[in-house]
Image (tube, rainbow, N blue to C red):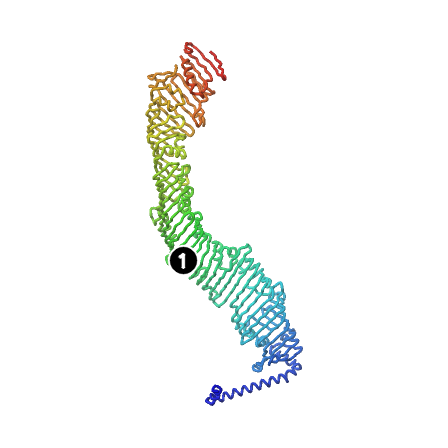
């Protein structure tokens, strides 16, 4: 076939040198096969039959190979495929002095590799050892001895032929070994590892091994150790590299501190462990550990306090790449003794250093809960400044997807770049920093600029120096940017929308820091709604403490819309009095506002108006509202200077209202006290105009000043205390904090014109008046007094009224000229006659008064009255005739004195008439009268003394 003949044609066409090389290869192969066959036959028929008899020679051969004395009790031979097999019993390897046995092997099996012929060295395909006992010892000098082999960790090379020979074998397998670790450096008790299974494979400079063993039960469950090492660790440990894996399903970590140099002092800790360890050039490069530990107590640095954890779970890693070192964690969670739990987190910290000095680094993590971290922050190996900040600022909330890179020292980096997601972030206030909680959003920052994108719910700000109270916001959305330059930091607020139960709106603007002073600002804000009761919360406490307190206690109700604020200028000159250094303006429209503007004054209600703040001045213009039931218009309030502890509030306004409602306002305000309460209990009709000008130093009610007036316009006014009604009352009553006066008031009193003047002094109000009375009007004013029907005509009068709290006294005088009195002798009077009349009323007790009527020199009637809600009731009376005197101090009506003449028939007839219409008239109780001429029963009696006393229905008469 063509392809079968191709090689022949190829060699036929080849040059002569190629034919020569092919012939040489065939010759070498033939010689190799021949030598192998010869060697195989030699071993089978020459070596194996005499091996036992040459046992000592073999022991000496092994001694030369490993450099230590070897003893063999017995040998047996066999085959493993094409490879010779030697089984050894009772192998002992002694120390170099030949005294103590460092390794005892009950049984070993060697499968010899044919490469021994090639390397002229004993090479094994496999070395299998059964139940050896191995001693590993660390001397007090720190030098290790494994089966008597010395290994110095600090040495660059170790001349140990046994270890080198073992590492040249293809495979070493150990079954059911016992290893004893004796640490003379730590002076620890021996540690025995039993039932050890070991397998080592050496291929092309790689040494892969696996080991399982059972440590003491109180220390750990069975150990699983695996490794892969490149290089020759016995020749020069510092040239090797490799990987190690350790697994312990249970271990008492703290108990191992007697035998192992733990990376940190651990007082307690139990659980499961898995380690992955890498090293290069004889130095550790990477360590990764999966841990599930409970009851952990440790100290992460000598200067730190103890760290106690109830549970620690997750993956922890460390990596050393020369100038770069990393610490990492995956799904790391922990729980501290107080029950606080950390959700699983991933993080990685990388630090670059040159000559031991940190030059930069990077930190990233997916989630970090700050509040649970506070109890253990003092025990963490972070920069001391960070621990102090953590303790002082008390951060809380959650940080997610954080990345941070820096150059220089981490506590004061030269450059940095970072980003993170904030969830309910908060911290305590410190110095000029406000306290905050509930911030959610994302942040990106460098050493020169940054952006905070806010999307927060239930945020709280603590600004004790500015607002005094906590500021709570239900939502905050918007963006804040900042940039650092050579002249300071610029902060940009891009339409930050805020809302809570009190208000809703947005703020935009800019802040610039300064090398000296607080910097400058340019802000605008607008609110679509605001609760008037809560406005005080947003008013600066430091600049206007008294105004803020007044707003807190005085605003009772109402809403505000279209609130606008503008602020610009140097913050050092805030609030920019007279526009100097900047501008601060607030304007809002309010509806349904209730204001308790001053102590003891009726509150304003249902106010609609505008409020403006310009610098240090606040002005309120009320278009309409109500106070004490009065509809008011055009009330203006202002504070000329909001600063200071006792800002002065001025209120001015006027309104036309029913006089009865004005009397109610008067009774509910301090005005009632200033005018002596003379309007208490008064009844009025008609309208008037009230004007007020008030000054209230906030926080100092004792310094309040008020002035005002009331203009009567055709009113009817009925004062308490039996004073005749004032009809068609006109004029102006002026009052202030200290006085009240009017000059004059005009009115119609008792059917005639009258003029009144009002003045005050020492807490009393005096009303003086004069006029003409139509006596027929008395029958209308005092219809309950039947005697007044006997009066007619008109006469002039003068009155003086004194008013104090709970006391009204008045005195009315008239000569009764023009008045006719149609009564029996001696009271009867013709209109042309003059008869001095005085009526005097005075308060004797809270619910009693006394009324005295003097009628010339003829008579004086004193009435003691009990005041009730329906009027007055006379319960004691004294009629003193002539020169008689006395007090009405006994129940009933008493008559005493002497008169020239009395028409008793006329008085009896009058009494009968009066008694028919007055069932509750005061009964006559006694008489003691001397009469010059008495007309009785149609007869005249002269020089008569009448004495009579009533006892029940009977009279005792003395004539």
Tell me where residue 189 sits by quadrant.
Answer: bottom right
Q: Nearer the viewer, residue 283 or 897?
A: 897
Q: Nearer the viewer, residue 142 or 233?
A: 233
Q: Position of residue 866 (x, y in %)?
A: 45, 25
Asked if residue 430 can be seen in this view, the reply is no
Q: Secondary structure at mark 1?
A: strand
**653 is higher (above) or lower (below) than 238:** above
Q: Residue furthest front?
A: 1
Tell me where residue 137 sits by quadrant.
Answer: bottom right
**57 is higher (above) or lower (below) than 780:** below
Q: Position of residue 293 (x, y in %)?
A: 56, 61
From the viewer's perspective, tell me whether residue 622 is left or right of residue 99: left
**695 is higher (above) or lower (below) than 9:** above
> Which residue, given by chain and number where applicable, does mark 1 sit on?
451
From the viewer's perspective, tell me whether residue 37 is left or right of residue 412: right
Q: Position of residue 228 (x, y in %)?
A: 54, 71
Asked if residue 668 can be seen in this view, the reply is yes
Q: Position of residue 367 (x, y in %)?
A: 48, 59
**673 is higher (above) or lower (below) than 68:** above
């Amino acid at each position: 076939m063509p392809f079968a003949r191709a090689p022949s044609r190829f060699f036929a066409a080849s040059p002569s040198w190629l034919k020569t090389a092919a012939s040489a290869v065939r010759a070498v192969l033939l010689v190799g096969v021949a030598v192998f066959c010869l060697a195989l036959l030699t071993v089978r028929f020459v070596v194996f039959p005499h091996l036992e008899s040459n046992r000592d020679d073999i022991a000496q051969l092994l001694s030369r190979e490993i450099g230590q004395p070897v003893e063999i009790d017995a040998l047996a031979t066999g085959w493993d495929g094409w490879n010779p097999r030697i089984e050894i019993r009772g192998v002992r390897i002694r120390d170099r002095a030949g005294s103590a046995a460092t390794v005892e092997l009950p049984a070993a099996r060697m499968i010899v590799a044919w490469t021994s012929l090639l390397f002229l060295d004993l090479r094994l395909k496999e070395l299998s050892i059964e139940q050896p006992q191995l001693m590993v010892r660390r001397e007090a000098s720190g030098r290790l001895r494994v089966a008597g082999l010395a290994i110095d960790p600090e040495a660059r090379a170790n001349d140990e032929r046994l270890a080198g020979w073992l590492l040249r074998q293809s495979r070493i397998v150990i079954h059911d070994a016992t290893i004893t670790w004796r640490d003379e450096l730590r002076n620890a008790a021996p540690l025995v590892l039993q039932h050890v299974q070991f397998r080592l494979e050496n291929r092309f400079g790689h040494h892969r091994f696996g080991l399982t063993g059972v440590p003491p039960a109180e220390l750990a469950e069975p150990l699983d150790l695996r490794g892969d090492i490149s290089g020759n660790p016995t020749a020069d440990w510092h040239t090797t590299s490799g990987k190690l894996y350790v697994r312990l399903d249970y271990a008492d970590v703290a108990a191992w501190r007697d035998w192992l140099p733990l990376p940190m002092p651990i007082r307690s800790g139990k659980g499961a462990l898995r380690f992955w360890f890498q090293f290069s050039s004889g130095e550790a490069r990477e360590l990764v550990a999966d841990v599930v530990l409970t009851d952990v107590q440790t100290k992460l640095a000598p200067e730190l306090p103890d760290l106690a954890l109830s549970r620690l779970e997750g993956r922890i890693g460390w990596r050393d790449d020369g100038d770069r070192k990393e610490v990492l964690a995956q799904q790391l969670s922990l729980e501290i003794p107080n029950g606080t739990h950390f959700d699983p987190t991933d993080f990685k910290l990388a630090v670059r250093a040159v000559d031991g000095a940190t030059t930069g680094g990077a930190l990233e993590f997916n989630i970090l809960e700050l509040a649970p971290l506070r109890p253990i922050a003092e025990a963490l190996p972070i920069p001391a400044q960070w621990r102090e900040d953590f303790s002082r600022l008390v951060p809380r909330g959650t940080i997610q997807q954080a990345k941070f890179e820096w150059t220089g020292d981490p506590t004061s980096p030269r450059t940095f770049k970072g980003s993170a997601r904030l969830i309910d972030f908060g911290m305590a206030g410190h110095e000029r920093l406000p306290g905050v909680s509930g911030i959610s959003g994302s942040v990106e920052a460098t050493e020169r600029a940054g952006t905070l994108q806010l999307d927060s719910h239930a945020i709280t700000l603590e600004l004790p120096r500015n607002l005094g109270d906590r500021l709570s916001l239900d939502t905050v959305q918007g963006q804040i940017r900042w940039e650092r330059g050579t002249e300071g930091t610029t902060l940009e607020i891009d339409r930050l929308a805020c809302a809570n139960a009190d208000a809703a709106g947005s703020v935009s603007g800019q802040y610039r820091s300064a090398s000296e002073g607080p910097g400058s600002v340019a802000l605008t804000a607008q609110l679509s709604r605001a609760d008037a009761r809560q406005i005080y919360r947003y008013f600066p406490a430091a600049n206007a403490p008294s105004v803020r307190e007044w707003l807190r206690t005085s605003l009772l109700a109402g809403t505000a819309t279209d609130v606008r604020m503008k602020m610009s200028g140097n913050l050092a000159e805030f609030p920019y009095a007279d526009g100097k250094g900047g501008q601060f303006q607030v304007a809002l429209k309010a509806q349904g506002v209730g204001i308790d503007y001053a102590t003891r004054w009726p509150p304003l209600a249902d106010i609609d108006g505008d409020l403006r703040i310009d610098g240090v001045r606040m002005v309120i213009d009320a278009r309409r509202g109500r106070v004490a039931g009065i509809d008011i218009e055009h009330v203006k309030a202002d504070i000329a200077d909001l600063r200071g502890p006792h800002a002065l509030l001025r209120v001015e306004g006027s309104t036309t209202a029913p006089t009865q409602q004005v009397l109610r306002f008067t009774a509910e305000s301090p005005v009632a006290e200033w005018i002596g309460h003379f309007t208490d209990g008064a009844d009025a009709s008609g309208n008037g105009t009230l004007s007020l000008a008030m000054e209230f130093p906030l926080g100092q009610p004792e310094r309040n000043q008020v002035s005002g007036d009331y203009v009567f316009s055709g009113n009817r006014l009925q004062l308490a205390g039996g004073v005749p009604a004032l009809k068609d009352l006109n004029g102006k009553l002026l009052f202030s904090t200290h006085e009240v006066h009017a000059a004059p008031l005009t009115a119609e009193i008792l059917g005639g014109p009258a003029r009144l003047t009002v003045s005050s002094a020492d807490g009393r109000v005096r009303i003086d008046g004069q006029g003409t009375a139509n006596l027929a009007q008395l029958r209308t004013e005092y219809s309950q007094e039947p005697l007044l029907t006997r009066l007619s005509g008109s006469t002039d009068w003068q009155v003086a009224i004194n008013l104090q709290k709970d006391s009204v006294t008045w005195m009315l005088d008239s000569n009764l000229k023009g008045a006719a009195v149609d009564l029996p002798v001696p009271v009867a009077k013709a209109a042309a006659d003059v008869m001095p009349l005085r009526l005097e009323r005075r308060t004797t007790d809270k619910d009693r008064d006394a009324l005295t009527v003097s009628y010339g020199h003829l008579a004086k009637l004193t009435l003691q009255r009990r005041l009730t809600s329906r009027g007055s009731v006379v319960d004691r009376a004294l009629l003193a005739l002539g020169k008689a005197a006395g007090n009405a101090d006994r129940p009933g009506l008493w008559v005493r004195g002497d008169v020239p003449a009395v028409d008793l028939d006329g008085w009896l007839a009058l009494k009968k008439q009066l008694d028919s219409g007055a069932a509750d008239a005061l009964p006559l109780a006694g008489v003691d009268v001397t009469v010059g001429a008495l007309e009785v029963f149609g007869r005249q009696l002269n020089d008569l003394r009448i004495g009579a006393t009533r006892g029940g229905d009977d009279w005792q008469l003395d004539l």
